[in-house]
Image (tube, rainbow, N blue to C red):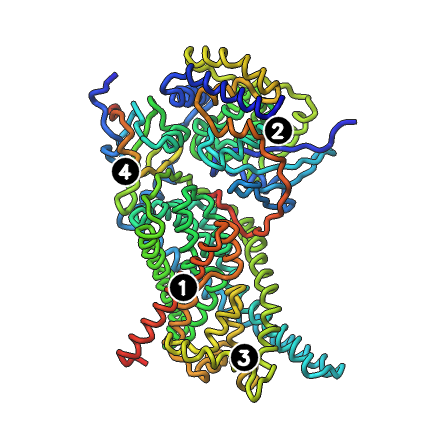
Amino acid sequence: MTRTNYTIALMGNPNTGKSTLFNVLTGLRQHTGNWPGKTVIRAEGEFAHRGATYRIVDLPGTYSLYSNSADEEVARDFLLFERPDLTIVVVDATALERNLNLALQVLEITGRVIVAVNLMDEAKKKGILINSKKLENKLGVPVVPISARNKEGIDKLMNTVDAMVRGRIKTNPLSIQYSPEIEQAISKLMPNIRETVGDAYPARWIALRLLDGDTSLLAALKQPPQRDTKEEGAYACCGSVESI
Amino acid sequence: MLAADRSNRFDRLLEEAQTLTPADTREQIVTAIFQTSAALCRECVTHRHNVKRDRTEQIDRIVTSKRWGFPIMLALLAAVLYMTIAGANVFSDSLARLFGTVETYLTMAFQAIHAPDWLHGLIVLGLYRGTAAVVSVMLPPMAIFFPLFALLENYGYLPRVAFNMDRLFKKTGAHGKQSLTMAMGFGCNAAAIMSTRIIESPRERMLAILTNNFVPCNGRWPTLILLSSLFMAAGYTGGWNTLVTAAVVVAMVLFGIIVTLAVSWILSKTALRGIPTHYTLELPPYRRPKIMETIIRATLDKSLYVLKRAVTVAAPAAILTWVLGNVHVGDTTVLAYLADGLDPFAKVLGLDGYILLAFILGLPANEIVFPILLMGYLSAGALTEVDGLSSLKQILLDHGWTWLTALNMMLFSLLHYPCGTTLVNIYKETKSVKWTFVAFALPTAIAIMVTFATAQLARWLGLV
Amino acid sequence: MAERNDCPLSRMKQGDRFRIANIAIPDPVLRRRLLDLGFVPGGEIEVGQKSPLGDPTAYRVRGTTIALRKEESNYIYGERINND
């Protein structure tokens, strides 16, 4: 039997049109929920494609995964502990450099990633041309150019999602080279980390976070948050605080 | 592996990591990532320069300029309100007529089946008429205001407001993002309370929560609009009436913002002492929203949602008001009895007992305050049917209203305690009975003080 | 390294280009946030417009616009880039 239910996490910087993509994918099949114990509102929705159903979680827009804020911790914890089958990182084609910063961080946690380059229409207007094939080769994960508000590239994105979850696409995520000093420290820490957390978590990434002194991550690893119990949001009218 | 053991291992790992760490690890890590990202962009992105001067930059040069920044904010606020008022007038009248016609048929149906008078009263005069009043007063401004506001929001204008206003908030000790939560409050204070989550510092978040109510929410727009068009702009006709009405409502909003800043300043010097935290604000590029989609989504998500809430609250409140207005104690109704009791105090504030009672019964939702007031007035006197604005004004005048009554009801509406839903949300967000009580008592005290002051001043100057 | 020429970002004028040498913001959370936004040593910034009330100021950094108050830009050191 093959699986037919998958979870997708939707990530991205604020203002990348992440929620627009979420709306396009799910239509009206969405609801907002509260993350238990956290102060962040999140939205969930469903869609079906080629016989599989997907639960898609719209994570808060963040600039990084370095636990500077509750939003970032929520996004990080979701990737680490809920282990979605797939993560779509939405990046803004008009500010790719800043946006790739987050995408590269996600690749350090998981290779099951599709990078959706959104706002291709805006970029074109501004005279920005993006070679997505080349970017795909460099990043080692599928890169799909889209324009969520014009509903362009959505089919290709869904087909890529389908191919990914069925294992037809193998990824080879780019690994960032740090300074020799840091690389040395990482290799020293790795064996111990593997021994402690097993293969469940990305050891190289955890080593980096430990070097950075990320105590919030440590606390989360010691006591992984409980699986969320769904809490129906009573405030559909909350609107998009995110557009802010 | 035991949890404690695992926990210890982590601690040892961290200790080990710290001994290996150079001083500027974070800089090194982030710099390496950005260098990678910059290298990727160099290879994969080509810029055709000067295809078109950056539109966002050009717009910002005007919209955030010293000369035009504030005038444009004010003009946009006025324009949105003007369109809301102008459009709502047309809508409201035809909706009220429609509901009136349906009421006639309903009454005929009740007579046809020989239903008892009390049943007709309860269902038609109470439930139906009250709910109809809420819908015909509420729906038109909402159906226009929400989509217009959503268009501005989606276009990317709101961060510019925060950028322009930042210094004012910093000076008062509040968070720069408070202007964004206030903007949410224009729609719905209850939702805005949730949106204060974007402010991470607890002190500044509390400031934003406690003052959010001074931004008139959608439940209060109609009251403000109605009263200012009936009383403040009474001397003007046609387009001028709409213009003056809009000007008065804009003045109310500005007054609300001034109160917000003043209260924030006082609180951050007293109960919520501290310095404002630093933050960064991104000014995203302007993006032309998908107009139809934005309108449809705003109407579906917001208007219908708020309307549903208004009606579910309005229906029971309408029945309650009808019952109170028809159950007699001695020779007066319970409603009149309560209103008479409140009257002396209300008069000091330039209001009357019925108005105060309507605010009290309207605690669950601001939308129903004005309809309750009308039902109260009508149950006390002859049961005339309200068709159109002139008869509405006549009812108010018959109950001794002057421009001062209208002004003070507007001020009380702007400043008084948050609605029930908002209070529930404040409790949920602060988890504190004390702060929820402050959120109730503080605006109420201010509303009482301000209306008291205007009433006394107007009387002392002999203006009424 | 031209350390002796380093001056705070807050001293720059609209239209100036600036290369960051050092971010000396004491608040660690804010320092990290600025790094995440692309204010990294060696990075380039273009100074944009001031808010109507004189503060904050908008900065162009890595294709985005970020507004910072004086309290922050006072602690970002670097040098003005003179070419073009």
Q: Numbered disc 3: what chain?
A: B
Query: Of circles 2 and 3, which is in front?
Result: 3
The first of marks 1 and 3 along the sequence is 3
Asked if badges 2 and 3 are on one and the same chain, I answer: no
Image quadrant in which the C terminus of chain A is located: top left
Residue B125, image x and y in percent? 62, 78
Mark 3 Cα shell of 10 Å, populated few (<14), some (14-19), many (≥20) = many
Residue C50 seen from this side: yes
Q: Which label was assigned to residue C70? A: 4
Indicate which disc residue B335 carries.
Answer: 3
Q: Position of residue B296 (x, y in %)?
A: 57, 52
Q: Quadrant of the N terminus of chain A?
A: top right
**Residue type marked 2:** Arg
Can you name the residue that lies furthest to the right here? A1
Task: Specify the subunit that label 2 lies on.
Answer: A
Q: CA distance from mark 2 to mark 3?
A: 60 Å
